[in-house]
Structure formats: structure tokens, C-alpha cells
Amino acid sequence: MTDFINKNFKYDGMYLKYENRFVARFKTGGMVAFKKFLRENFTVEEYFNLLEGCEMPPLKVLETKGYVSPTVCRTLKRKGYPQTQAGFKALVDDQIAYFKNKQ
């Protein structure tokens, strides 16, 4: 199993690649947190197997190990929820219940 090496990442302004293989696309930021989580939680083989073999989008691959984007973390913190996948699910469930009761 091969660990990700930071210097092997290349970013061209929208697409992040690792040794010329597509990793993810970033329109509005979050790349630093994404790369850090990727390096700390995945091997190269494991990530690309899920990305290419299972045809999962990059964000869903990281979410399999509990990744929460910086934007979502800020929202969860502001609203008093834990900054985890469970906190995000609770926020969504609460929002759905709120709007259903409002009707």
C-alpha cells in the first residue's frame, strides 16, 4: 500500500491530480482540507479503487471515512451541531422536519 506524497499532487486551478491521475475538481475552495484528509486516511490504491472501480465521486469517497467539508463544518458549528457526518445528518433531518411542520 502506497501513501500519498504531497509533492506528487498537481493543481491547475480547477483540477487536482496525483501523478497525472484525476483526484478531484475544486470550484470554490476546500482543496487543502480535502488533500490533508486524503493523505491521512487513504492509500493511493484504496482511493483510486473507490474512485475509479466503484465509480464514486471524490467527495463520497472521503465521506466513507467521515470527511466533512470546511464549509459544512462552519455551518454545523454555527448552528450548534457536532462537526461530523452524524451532525450533518441531524441538521438535514431537523431542517426537513422544520419545513414539513411549517406547511
Image (cartoon, rainbow, N blue to C red):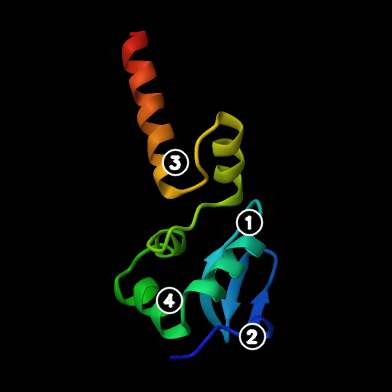
Disc marking residue 47: 4
On the image, numbered disc 3 is attached to which residue? 87
Q: Which mark is residue 30?
A: 1
Label 4 environment density (alpha carbons within 10 Å; few <14, some 14–19, many ≥20): many
- Cα–Cα span, label 3 and label 4: 24 Å
Q: Nearer the viewer, mark 3 or mark 4?
A: 3
At numbered mark 3, what does the secondary structure look like: helix, strand or loop?
helix
Task: Return the x and y of residue 5 as percentages of the image width and height.
Answer: 61, 85
Type of amino acid at the residue the image marks with label 4: Tyr
Q: Nearer the viewer, mark 2 or mark 3?
A: 3
- Mark 4 or mark 1: which comes first in sequence? 1
Residue located farthest toward the top when viewing the structure as drawn: 103
Q: Residue at x 35, y 65 (%)?
A: 56
Q: Which residue shows up at 47% across the image and 83% down it?
A: 44
Q: Is residue 95 above or below residue 1?
A: above
Q: Nearer the viewer, residue 44 or 20?
A: 44
The residue type indicated by label 2 comes to Asn
Q: Residues within 10 Å of mark 3 (few under 14, many from 20)?
A: some
Distance of mark 2 from mark 3, alpha carbons?
Answer: 33 Å
Question: Which residue lies under the disc numbered 2?
Answer: 8
Inter-mark Cα distance, 2 to 1:
18 Å
Provide residue 16's location: percent of width, then percent of height.
60, 71
Residues at marks 2 and 1 touching, judged by CB atoms closer than 8 Å: no
